[in-house]
Amino acid sequence: MRTEFVASYYHTPSDTVRRLFYNVVRAGHLRAAPDYHIERNHLPGHDLLLCLDGAGFVMSRNRRFRVEAGEFAWISGYQPHAHWADPRSPWELYWIRIDGHQIEETCNILSVYRTPVFSRIPLPEVRAQYERILQIMRDRPAALDALLNAAVSELLAILFENRQAEVAQSLTAGKAFSPDIQNSITKMTLYPDRHWRVKDLARLSGLSEPHFFRRFRQVTGSSPIDWLRRERINHARRRLVQSNDPIKQVAEQVGYNDAFFFSRDFKRYTGLAPSQYRLQHVREE
């Protein structure tokens, strides 16, 4: 049995389009043979795979992840990567290769390097976007680049919703936060870079500021701002290991405008300066 390419399309966007939009440079539909295996050291762009049937695997940061039917996998081409079919049940895939000036940051926000597989996605909605992209690539209408950008944006919006739901579920796993503070905790976890104030968080919870503060401390054992600081440091620890971003940029990504205060808080909670933490844990990886 050979791998069957049901459809395969190419596109070369202009430099202007590359600056403006999410770009789709390849798209296709394939039914894999048992020996289907792709391995590369570097490839411009990101491959987004939708497993329609069967199963397969993706490799990210030297970790193997299984992809089942109805699941979605994101592979960054800017690092060594691989994907292959399960020989016992080779997968059928829709796939697109996308690029754009903001795609790497989107990849980071979605924690793709840590968790490249998206489970429990709304399959009909995701499949519809893939089929829309394939049709645009096939028909090549005059507004091709703008239409592809719109379809990719809708697909990414679905992935953001999916990952936010996963975060919310992980927050309540093993410890049920009461509804009156759950919304504020979820927002701080998803958006640690925002300038949160206690009155803003209280408003999210529908409580007065003093009542919210008391309830938050009662449930979590810490004040809202201390909880936020620790959550920011958790995000920073992941970014230091999973990216090559300068420490000042990592500080800004998690809500610190001053690198000095970031380094002070980081060392307070981890016992190491950010540069020491990165060096130690990247070696461990």
Image (tube, rainbow, N blue to C red):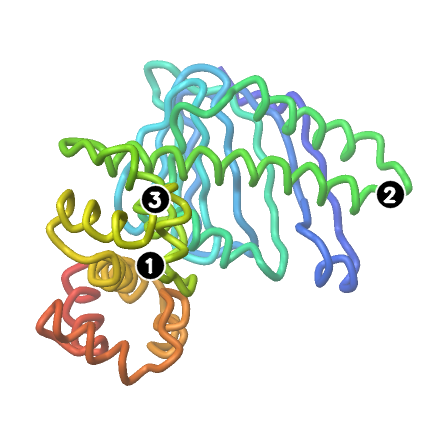
Q: Residues within 10 Å of mark 1 (few under 14, many from 20)?
A: some
Q: Residues within 10 Å of mark 2 (few under 14, many from 20)?
A: few
Report the residue at 33% width, 59% height from top: 198
Q: CA distance from mark 2 to mark 1?
A: 46 Å
Above/below status of 36 relative to 60? above
Q: Which residue is mark 3?
A: 207
The mark that comes first in sequence, 2 or 3, is 2
Three-letter amino acid code of the residue under disc 2: Ala
Three-letter amino acid code of the residue under disc 3: Leu
Q: Do tag 2 and tag 1 residues touch (Cβ < 8 Å)?
A: no
Tell me where residue 185 appears, x and y as whole percent. Answer: 30, 46
Q: Do tag 2 and tag 3 residues touch (Cβ < 8 Å)?
A: no
Q: Place residue 222 in its image quadrant.
A: bottom left
Q: Which residue is mark 1?
A: 198
Above/below status of 220 relative to 165? below
The mark that comes first in sequence, 2 or 1, is 2
Q: Which residue is mark 2?
A: 143
Three-letter amino acid code of the residue under disc 1: Val
> Could you say whether the residue bearing mark 1 is in a helix, strand or loop?
helix
Please state if 126 lies on the left or on the right of 173 as rendered: right
Please state if 111 lies on the left or on the right of 232 as rendered: right
